[in-house]
Image (cartoon, grey):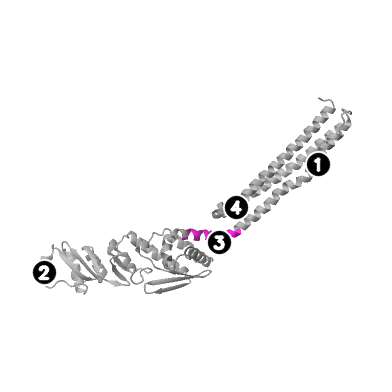
Amino acid sequence: MTQLDLVVRLCRELTAPFVEDALLHGYIDSLTAETLTVLRKLDADGHYMLPTAFDEQRALGQPFKVRDVAIPRLPEMFFASTWDEFLQHHNFRFAKPRSYFVIETNFYSADATQDQFADRYSQVVDLIKLLEEIADVSQPSAGRLALVFMVKEKFELTIDYGAADLRALSELNSLRNEFIVDDAHTEQRKSILKSALMEMLKNVPSGERFKHLLSVFDELKRRARDNYQLYVAGFSFEKVREEVQENRLEYTLKLNKVFAELQNQLLAVPAALLLVGSQMDEKAGDSLKNWALWFGALIFTGFMNMLLRNQRHSLKAINDEISELKEKLTVEHAALATKLMPMYGELDKRYKQQKNALLFVEVLIAGVLLFCTFLFGRYCKFW
C-alpha cells in the first residue's frame, strides 16, 4: 500500500479530521486492530510516530488522538483538505495526479465511484486537453497554463479557476469527436472552433475568460456546430443571404414580365369595344355585317383566353420554382431558414397580385364579349 492509501484509510476512521502545516490530525472514538495496523505501517515508514511507551493492548477499544501524520503532497500523489486547496497546488488545474484524496467530499481517486466534484473536475481537465490540441501555442509553467490562439489576431486564454467554477460539461466527448478528427477537414474544424471561442471570450477580462467559458460551454458547442454546418455546405450566412436576394430579384422580374407581356394586348380590349360598338348597325338588323362583327368579337375573345391561359401556366410555373427555392433553403440551411424565409414572402405577395391582375383581365374580356353579344342580339331583334 502507498503512503496515500494508508493515510486515506486512517483519515476515514477519524472524527473531524483536519490538516495543518501538511500534517493530518484527528480523533478516533474507538481504536481498532485494523486502524492500529495502519498506524504501525505509517510509523515504520516514518510518516507517523506512535507515542512513547505505547501500550497496544490497553489502547485497543479506547479513544485515541492522532496527531502529526505526514500527508503526501507530490505531483503524482496528493492529499488535500478541500477542492480549492487541491486546485491551487502543482499543475492540478490542467493535469490530474495519478492518485489524490480530498477530505471535503471524502473522495479518493482509487475508489470505484466518483462524486460530483471529481466528475466535473475530470471533464474540465478533458476540456483543457481539447483546447491544448487546437491552440497554436501552449505555455505551461508552475501551476499555470496559458494557451495562445492565432485566429484573426492573437488571443490568449489563461487556465485559472476554482472549485466553485466547476461545471458539468455535457457532450464534451461528442464535441471532441466532431472537431478533433484526422481527415481532410481537420484544420478547418480546428479553425472554426478557435473562431467560436474567440468570438465568445474576446470581450471578457483576461483573468476571467476560462471561468466564463465553463459557464457558457453549451453556447460554444452551439456556435461551433452552426458555423461548421455552414462550412460544410460551402456557404457563409452572407453568401446565403446574397443568393436569396438574387433569387428574389430574378423572380420579381419574372412575375412582372408575366403581366407586362399582356399590356400591349390589353390595349386591344377598349379598341375592340369601340370597334364593335361603332360598327354594328341597328338599321342593318340581322345582316352579314353584324354577324361578322360578332364573330370577330368571339375570335378576339378566344385568342385572348388562349393568351391568358398561357400566362396563368407561366405564373404557376414561376410560383412552383419559388416553392422549390424555399424548400431548398429549409433543407440545406435549416439554421438560417427562419431568418431568410421572410425575403421570399415578398414574392408570394407579388404572385397573388399578378394572379388577381390576370383574373381582372379575364373578367374585362368576358364583359366586352357580353356587351358585344347584347348589341348584336338587340340589333338583330333577338330580344
The answer to whether the residue labelled 4 contacts the one labelled 1, judged by CB atoms less than 8 Å apart, is no
Is 10 placed left or right of 76 in the picture? left
**In this view, the mark in front (1 or 2):** 1
Question: Quick one: label 3 or label 1, which is nearer the N terminus?
Answer: 3
Tell me, yes or no, whether the two marked residues, 3 and 1, touch with CB atoms within 8 Å.
Answer: no
Task: Tell me, for residue 231, which label it has, or none.
Answer: 3
| Residue 114 locus on image (x, y percent) | 32, 60
Looking at the image, is 258 positioned above or below residue 62?
A: above
Q: Tag on residue 79?
A: none
Mark 3 and mark 1: Cα distance apart in space? 55 Å
Look at mark 4 in the image and give the residue it sits on: 328
Looking at marks 4 and 1 on the same chain, the residue that comes earlier in the sequence is marked by: 1
- Residue 348 horizontal side relative to residue 116, left or right: right
Q: Label 2 vs label 3: CA separation? A: 76 Å
What is the spatial separation of the Cα atoms under label 2 and label 4, in whole angstroms? 87 Å
| Left or right: 316 as drawn, with respect to 141 | right
Query: What SS does tag 4 mark?
Result: helix
Q: CA distance from mark 4 to mark 1?
A: 42 Å
Q: Who comes first in sequence, dot 2 or dot 4?
A: 2
Q: Is 230 inside the magenta-drawn segment?
A: yes
Among numbered discs 4 and 3, the one appearing first in the sequence: 3
Residue type, label 3: Tyr
Q: Which mark is residue 55?
A: 2
Q: Secondary structure at mark 2?
A: loop
Badge 1 is on which residue? 268
Label 4 packing within 10 angstroms: few (<14), some (14-19), many (20+): few
Q: Amino acid at mark 2?
A: Asp
In this picture, is 370 found above or below 253? above
